[in-house]
Image: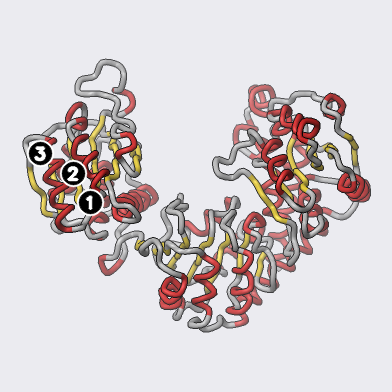
Amino acid sequence: MPARPDTHLLLRAFADELARCGVREACTSPGSRSSPLVLALARESRLRCFSHIDERCAGFFALGAAKRSGRAVAVTCTSGTAAANLAPAVIEAFQARVPLVVLTADRPPELREIGAGQTIDQIDLYGSAAKWFFEVGTHDATPERVRWMRALACRAAWTALEGRPGPVHLNFALREPLVAAPELGDDPQPGRSGGRPWVLRSTPGEDAAAAGRALAVVARDAHRPVVVAGREEPGLEAVAAVCERLGWPLLADPLSGARRGAAAIAHYDALLRVEGFAAARRPDLVVRCGDLPTSKPLRAWLDGLGSGVTQLGFDPHGAWQDPGASLEIVLAAAAAPTLAAAAGHTPTADPAWLRSWRTADAVAAAAIDGVLGDGGLSEPLVARTLVAELPADATLFVASSMPVRDVESFAAVRDDAPRVLCNRGANGIDGTVSSAFGAAAVARGRVVLLIGDVALAYDIGGLLAASRLGLALTIVLLDNDGGGIFEFLPIAGQRDVFEEHVATPHGLDFAHAAALYGCAFADVTDLGGLRDALDEALARERITIVRVASERAANLALHRELSAAVAAVMAN
């Protein structure tokens, strides 16, 4: 962390959240690098801080206190072998299932592996004995970073306690000077009112009925609720029926399977780019199901709502999907059964609230259709058409980068839509072809892969699965000779470097790749040709590559035209 008041502002918020989460004891030992941590803990009035000369004693003292109280206990130390001396207590805490929050000070990255004193490798120092390890980077004390620090403290405390209790390890890189002025000033991001933790998390294993009652209490006074459904939590399709029953707008990523029913809003990505619309649709409750959708405007809108809007998320797997640190309540339960249980105790929303979203969605859809037309093919039109017209029992596997964004932005609501899958865990393009073949091996219906040229080239060897394993797959290839998504980034303005080193045009003719791997191949240029090629490909028991040529600059211009068209109709 920056060696200025920023460090101490961030750590003050961290210690505040530990106390809000029920931590009442902390153990310290002397050292220079750990001074900011010691000051933050010792000056937090709700913590009893116990000073120890020896780190090994401090660790076992903390363990005994946690074992007796059942609460998580914090323990901090300076850098170097001081941190290693906590290892016996950390190992015992793991074996004995005792919750500890271990806070080690460390040199910043620029002082590592260059001979600086009291510096060892502290990354993942305790190995498998720590339930969770996190390297805390260096940050300025902006409201966003302080909010993140508060959420980090909550995650550390709850992770130490939940499931099988045990130690968690946070490693803090700290820069000099290590002591700030006594008066730090106001907190850039104050904590929640009433002394509540930044993130209040329910007990894992809570049944749907109990979690539903908790949700109903939160929702009973909500007049403008919104549900956001993200990717890949099983059963989210059922959320659509609950939202329809309650009259809650449902902003559903196609990867969730919930973009269906009378409450589903398809074009939130385009709508939330319109400043006036986003401001006018400020909710008083946000319920988040599954991982966050891909849409950047949606994420920015959620993070910008502020602490005046309650945001509740479902997290049955302890994934902590909250990069903006905006969640206030986390239910460690499955979303669909919990929402169904809550529905019986929750009043329906004013019909005008959902109607305002649905009307805007219909207007945006008409504007998008007006720009895309139904003739010449474009990348957004291909994405929109596949979700609209593939058989209900089909699976659409979508590559990361632009294809998944186009599917999210332009796919309309459809009650019997195909299953949509994407490798969005790490958001990479590697292995996309092979993953689609894996889906084809177990799917009951046909599988279609929507992929860009770079991603196909990256996993071209995956096509071997067609001949070696006897699998059928239809590949719709969006070929713009390079990384089309990079045209949307500021680096695109650096034309002297951009084309060769970022866009990376390759000049490949994928008809040759199709021939090499024994695939059928078709080039299509209009919507009718795409439909015919898909019909033929889906009827074959083999792999078919359907190529749609595109041009990167034209694709960027089209996306801008689509956004402008939606903004224009929403202004009227």
318 w.r.t. 360: above or below: above
* Residue topped by disc 2: 75
456 left or right of 325?
right
Quarter-wise, where is residue 353 in the image? Answer: bottom right
Quarter-wise, where is residue 22 in the image? Answer: bottom left
- Residue 15, disc: 1
**Frontmost residue, 353 versus 422:** 422
Identify the secondary structure beneath mark 2: strand
Identify the secondary structure beneath mark 1: helix
Q: Which residue is drawn at 30% across and 60% down?
A: 191
| Structural distance between the alpha carbons of marks 3 and 1 | 22 Å
Amino acid identity at mark 1? Ala
Please say whether residue 268 is visible from this viewpoint.
yes
308 left or right of 379?
left
x, y percentage for residue 562?
74, 53
x, y percentage for residue 172?
28, 37
x, y percentage for residue 82?
17, 30
Identify the secondary structure beneath mark 3: helix
| Structural distance between the alpha carbons of marks 3 and 2 | 11 Å
Q: Earlier in the sequence, mark 3 or mark 1?
A: 1
Q: Residue at x 90, y 37 (%)?
A: 522
| Proximity of marks 3 and 2: CB atoms separated by less than 8 Å | no
Q: Which of marks 1 and 2 is nearer the N terminus?
A: 1
Crowding around mark 1 (Cα neighbors within 10 Å: few <14, some 14 to 19, many 20+) is many
Numbered disc in front, either 1 or 2: 2
273 left or right of 134?
right
| Structural distance between the alpha carbons of marks 1 and 2 | 12 Å
Q: Residue at x 13, y 36 (%)?
A: 56
- Residue 57, disc: 3
